[in-house]
Amino acid sequence: MTDPLAPLALEAAQRHCRSLQDALGRFRRQHLERIAQWGGELAAVLPVGGRLLAAGNGGSAAQAQHLTAELVGRYKDERPAYSAIALHAETSSVTAIGNDYGFDQVYARQVAAHGRPGDVLVLLSTSGRSANLVAAAVTGRAAGLRVWALTGPGPNPLAEAADEALCVEADATATVQETHLVAVHLLCACFDAAVTGAGGRPARAAGASAPVAAHRRMS
């Protein structure tokens, strides 16, 4: 017996796929150059002792942790491990800071603790309006970190608080998150390509320099 709801479910699935296809098309036209740039900048930071910090809420927290796992482990090809921390995964810190200082500070205080000038902070939010991520961006920039945001449609407060933002133009939260996952994978691919671009040696991008490495040696 045919399920009378099956055509409705199929149409919903088709709409979802069309929405994602449209968002990825816009992403490809508008943001590939920026992702490649970020990959190159990251390749100038991590191999000389810098660190990537990442944070998000809910599904975006999972995306942030996915990114750090690809850097500490590997994305595709074998390479050294690099320092990357998903701030939401520090559960004792998150709950202690939330209890003592409020949820808006759960990431900002960790950025103040772990971030060093020259490090990179990646913040993911489908709305771009999460107060704890905006606070982290402000703290990160004040501490000399490079702050990148992956958000939903702009303008939004997080994009404005970051140094640079990649804003996904899509109506559905799920579509924004799925496009963010593509962005995370492309960032890792661009990082890997840049870090091995000089005959297997780290390829230094413009703007990144020895102070990061010097700081790490002293700390």
Image (spheres, grey):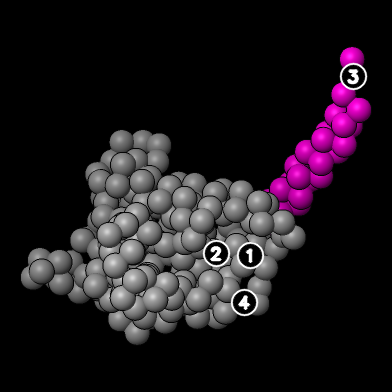
Question: Which amino acid does the dot numbered 4 rest on?
Answer: Asn
The numbered mark, 1 or 3, whose residue comes first in the sequence reads: 3
**Disc 1 to disc 2: CB gap under 8 Å:** yes
Image location of residue 141, percent across then percent down: 38, 80
Q: Quadrant of the C terminus?
A: bottom left
Residue linked to disc 3: 2
The numbered mark, 2 or 4, whose residue comes first in the sequence reads: 2
Question: Which amino acid does the dot numbered 3 rest on?
Answer: Thr
The answer to whether residue 60 is left or right of residue 137 is right
Snapshot quadrant of residue 47: bottom left
What kind of element bears circle 3?
loop
**Disc 3 to disc 2: CB gap under 8 Å:** no
Q: Which residues are magenta?
A: 1-26
What kind of element bears circle 4?
loop
Which residue extends farthest left? 218
What kind of element bears circle 2?
strand
Magenta stretch encompasses residue 8: yes
Disc sitting over residue 152 in the figure: 1
Question: Which amino acid does the dot numbered 1 rest on?
Answer: Gly
Marks 4, 3: nearer the viewer: 3
Q: Is residue 190 visible?
A: no
Disc 4 crowd rating (10 Å Cα; few below 14, some 14-19, many 20+) is: some
Disc 1 crowd rating (10 Å Cα; few below 14, some 14-19, many 20+) is: many
Residue linked to disc 2: 125
